[in-house]
Image (tube, helix red, strand yellow):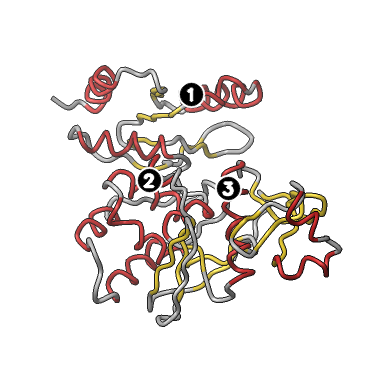
Amino acid sequence: MFNDSRWEMRDYPRLFAARDAQKFGITRHQLFNTQRCPIVLPGVRMDRESLESRRTPRWADESWERDSLRLRAARLKFSHILADYSTAARIYGWPLPWNLMNDPRLRLCTAELDRRIRMPDVTVRRTRHAAAATWLDLPVLGPADTFLAIAPDLTLGDLVKVGDAAVGKWHGPPQLSLDALKGLVSRRERLRGRRHLCNAIDLIRPGVDSPRETDLRLWMISVGLPEPTVHPKIETDLPRGKVEPDLGYEEARLALEYEGDHHRSSPEQWTRDIERDEAMRDAGWIVLKVTSRTNYRSLESKIRHHLRLA
């Protein structure tokens, strides 16, 4: 399911069932009296002295690596489980609110309705809707079903950010299409928080590059501004031809660019930004820059002025 250049090989401790320690040349003393083989899950350990390479997203941090390690440990113990809920969303790289991003429990699901699994800090949901997917060799609940699973516990804004990530290219190719998500919602008879889910789907837009862009677009809608176009295409004299700012109003030739800290810390990015902005202005567009320090009341006034709104 994942085939993108934005991954790399990283080393992870080898996992093994504790009962198979001797097969891997690990003595009882090493298993129980040293720090070589700590417990990952009950009955599953890792060997810090034996490493194996695994595909890993380049953006993955230690938290992602820990999730993937625990998930593979669970799969070693139970062949039928999938990552679920917040665990699956983190594996996909979706932008979750703090409470779900730091959820300490390993969230799993299974389609085996009579299966019961009890382990500390592990939650297993039994469901008939356990569409299996593989994400960087990891067993996960399919993106659409994961979206439906977390939807009732997110605010509208947070859910739209997750949706924009899933149908966009934040961390690789799109993980699902908006049409597929709408189709699943219409087919699912029993769905918790259906209205909330449908409201979010109506606001999801393909092509968004970051959660900050989603926040900016939703803020503009919330204060009564017309919804801007995501990545309007502007013909320029640059060698690459068209430029696509984050948001824009084509008729008013007004572009908005959200700039995070990496725009200032990277000389290459800074140079590209200057060239892009100059090209848009040469094409007759006005460019408004937005940062984390922007005064949004002032920004609203500027947008209304350029759009000739009262």
Tell me: 296 left or right of 117. Answer: left
Mark 1: which secondary structure?
helix
At 56% from the left edge and 26% from the top edge, which residue is drawn?
262
Residue pointed to by mark 2:
161
Q: CA distance from mark 2 to mark 1?
A: 33 Å
Toward which corner of the image does residue 193 lie, by quadrant? Answer: bottom left
Up the image or down, 230 lies above or below 178; here it is: above
The quadrant of the picture occupied by the C terminus is top left
Mark 2: which secondary structure?
helix
Report x, y in % for residue 25: 86, 63
- Give, as a three-letter code, the residue at label 3: Trp
Q: Nearer the viewer, mark 1 or mark 3?
A: 3
Residue pointed to by mark 3:
64
At 20% from the left edge and 25% from the top edge, which residue is drawn?
308
Is there a contact, CB below 8 Å, between mark 2 and mark 3? no
Q: Nearer the viewer, mark 2 or mark 1?
A: 2
Toward which corner of the image does residue 178 lie, by quadrant? Answer: bottom left
Q: CA distance from mark 1 to mark 3?
A: 43 Å
At 42% from the left edge and 22% from the top edge, which residue is drawn?
291
| Residue 155 circle label | none
Residue pointed to by mark 1:
282
Mark 3: which secondary structure?
helix
Q: Looking at the image, tell me whether mark 1 or mark 3 is earlier in sequence order.
A: 3
Up the image or down, 42 lies above or below 128; here it is: above
Q: Nearer the viewer, mark 2 or mark 3?
A: 3
- Give, as a three-letter code, the residue at label 1: Asp
Q: Looking at the image, tell me whether mark 2 or mark 1 is earlier in sequence order.
A: 2
Report x, y in % for residue 263: 55, 24
| 235 and 37: which is toward the camera | 37
